[in-house]
Amino acid sequence: MTNLQKKYKYINFPLGFIAGIDKKRAEMIFSWSILNMAKTIRPDNDEVVAREMAYIFLRNDKRMSQDLWEQFDEDIRETSHFCPDDFMAFESDGTFTGGAVYDFVLSELQKNEAFKSDCVELFQHEKAMDVLGITGPTLDSRKKMYGKLNKIHREGDAIVSINKNLLFDYRDGKLPEDMFRLICAVKSVIGMRNFNKTYKSVLLSRMFGAKNQEILDKVLQDEETRGKYEFLMRRRQFDSLLNRAVDRGLFTIIPASRGYFVSTRYDEEKLQEQIKKRSTMKRSKTKFIKSEAWSQQEA
């Protein structure tokens, strides 16, 4: 696994996006996450961008937008050294160099900021796809989906961070909708921590993309969504869902005073150990605070 693959092991998106989750929305979420990830990938230099653009163009690849393609096509095909079968783009040992196309792109990158911006954006998108080991829609298609989701993005929303395979499993019918909603809710509650305590009401709310009651009230105005929510409010149905998710290994859960401790990192034994450790630390802190209070009163 490369450093980039370790860094981008998970995809991140706002909790509110799962309010109207379906297979189409799942693809949109993935596109939104990929484009956000892509923005953080910085090419080492202009040369790597020029080489990637040359490769895409010479392969007559549809990943390139129509506008960018036309810029290449108009200028490069007038170059006397351009060879349609791209023979000149390879060394004798098979190493791709890009030939005259590479030279053209590199020159344009250094003098045309708008052109460079388009090329770097495409480079970042392709690198993100490569890191995640996927293929899929073009950059233009993803940007359209990104724009649609951005319209419902609420500032300050909780963030869900999940392995990309969970989103694929839901999209491909391998993970039921209620279970996908649940793991998203659990992950949003845990955040950057190793485990956290939560409650049924919190998990149910977050399963439908709502960080608080005000948002939940709006979400439940949709009759179909309200039906799903009310079904899972039944204790038997909710407990059954929790048990199925645990059996599938999605997370570990331990009941605790009207709520639950949840973790996607620890098994049951380790989670019990960490809960006891936290409890001990809280008791020690409480004793220290009381001791300080008495000291101040005596003074």
Image: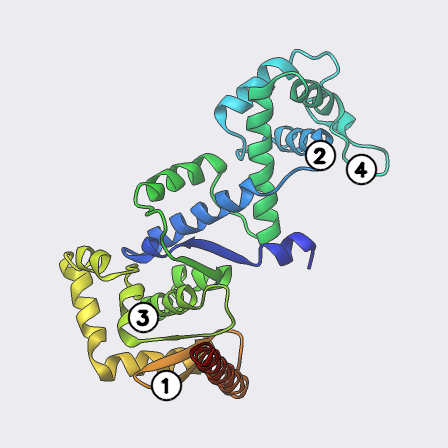
The dot on residue 33 is none
Task: Give yes or no for contact between labels 2 and 4 (Cβ–Cβ under 8 Å).
Answer: no
> Can you give x and y, in whole percent of width and height, for residue 242 in the image?
35, 79
Which of the two discs, 4 and 1, sits closer to the camera? Answer: 1
Left or right: residue 259 compared with residue 66: left
Residue displayed at 41% across by 80% down: 261
Q: Residue furthest right?
A: 92
Give the class, few, some or many, for how many residues have Cα within 10 Å of label 1's Cα (few <14, many ≥20).
Answer: few
Residue displayed at 34% across by 66% down: 181
Q: Nearer the viewer, residue 100 or 249?
A: 249
Residue type, mark 1 in image: Ala
Residue under label 2, please give it: 48
Q: Nearer the viewer, residue 28 or 61?
A: 28
Task: Give yes or no for contact between labels 4 and 1 (Cβ–Cβ under 8 Å).
Answer: no
Residue under label 4, please give it: 95
> Label 2, label 1: how many angstroms apart (C-alpha)?
54 Å
Task: Note whether residue 174 is visible.
Answer: no
Residue under label 1, please give it: 256
Residue displayed at 39% across by 37% down: 144
Residue under label 3, please give it: 203
